[in-house]
Amino acid sequence: MTITATAPRTARAAHAQRLPSTGMLADRFRRPLRDLRISLTDRCNFRCVYCMPRAVFGSDYAFLDRDELLSFDEIERIARVAAGHGVRKLRLTGGEPLLRRGVEDLIGRLAALRTPDGDRLEIALTTNGSALAVKAQALKDAGLDRLTVSIDSLDDELFQRMNDVRFPVSRVLDGIGAAHAAGIGPIKLNMVVKRGLNDGEIEAMAARFKGTPYTLRFIEYMDVGTSNGWELDEVVSAAEIVARIAALFPLEEIPAAVPGETARRWRYLDGGGEIGVISSVTNTFCGTCNRARISTEGKLFTCLFATEGHDLRALLRGGASDDELAAAMASIWGARDDRYSEERASLTPELRAARPRIEMSYIGG
């Protein structure tokens, strides 16, 4: 059965319909498509200095109009077709995805989708945590499985300076606690580390979340987009981060939990849990990347550092069938040869600066 973006919705059972398998996709480097990240909005209530600096995203910045955003019907349709191509995990991003009205309804619809084998897709969400204390139970009830919360410092003054809207870190911590109490899990906490800004917080963050139900992940400061003024000497390497933590709390590396995982994992020897490090600058992982991204208005991007996307919204609103949408996605992924993180080291600073890139707030992390 072909379901269009405007098809009437008569019962919950309609959500569970699934397409026959359209075949597992592989790109030019034989990387499969397993993870689809969907941006729900280009708006965010934070103005983090490494993502949406106020100097660029000020009060006069022109965000997308509502009718430019993918509707929930359109998102669900893309997700259903993607499941037929081998996608097993959906991650909702932004901007700040909890700013999108009715996000719980969308999660419920996505959670009801099934793979060609009848399995449920894994539903994850990345958030700045500002609305979690209010939304956590509704998100869990809707079917959210996994949660990632951005938290870059425990020092309130520094945290507020980094988010640049005077939002206190205590409210994010309250939201994390509410999500855990609601039964969402696993919960991962992401800290973007920028030298000279919050790198002094590495040990304090590790100590705070060691022995808790949460997995703390440290992310090397990346050159996503062009608005954050990225410089290589502002990157704190994953190796340095691990060494600094291990000097306080001995660690051992452990294998990836799933193929294509972005973070290298390290376990505390005393049983106090684990940390992750995401090293897309100093220790790239392009060779196992199995992720695609859908921007807020429906463009398919095959790399976080892409220079352009492929317009699926035009197909959706132009009357394309599911078979045509599936064929378009297969063609795009099959032609994929992205490996920017591997190529970065061979580029001069001038070439890196001249290369157009998509902003993280638009494409999602």
Image (tube, rainbow, N blue to C red):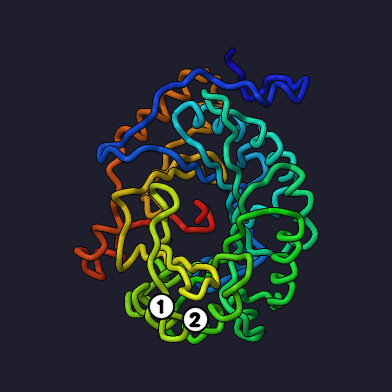
Q: Which residue is mark 2?
A: 202
Neighbor class of circle 1 (other Cα within 10 Å; few <14, some 14-19, many 20+) is: some
Side of 13 relative to 315 (left or right):
right
For residue 223, say whether it is visible: no
Along the viewing direction, whichever of 224 and 212 lies nearer the viewer:
212
Q: Are marks 2 and 1 in contact (CB under 8 Å)?
A: yes
Q: Residue at x 30, y 36 (%)?
A: 27
Along the viewing direction, whichever of 174 and 55 lies nearer the viewer:
174
Of callouts 2 and 1, the N-terminal one: 2
Query: Which residue ends up furthest to the top in the rendered image?
Result: 1
- Secondary structure under the numbered disc 1 in the rendered image: helix
Quadrant for the N terminus, please: top right
- Residue 13: which quarter of the image? top right
Query: Which residue ends up furthest to the front in the rendered image?
Result: 270
What label does residue 303 carry, if any? Answer: none
Neighbor class of circle 2 (other Cα within 10 Å; few <14, some 14-19, many 20+) is: some
Residue 191 spot, x, y in % from top left: 52, 71
Q: Which residue is mark 1?
A: 241
Q: Residue at x 57, y 36 (%)?
A: 121
Residue 354 spot, x, y in % from top left: 30, 62
In the rendered image, the vertical position of residue 260 relative to residue 327, given as above or below: below
Residue 255 spot, x, y in % from top left: 38, 57
For residue 167, say whether it is visible: yes
Side of 41 relative to 218 (left or right):
right
Per the model, the C-alpha gap separating discs 2 and 1 is 7 Å
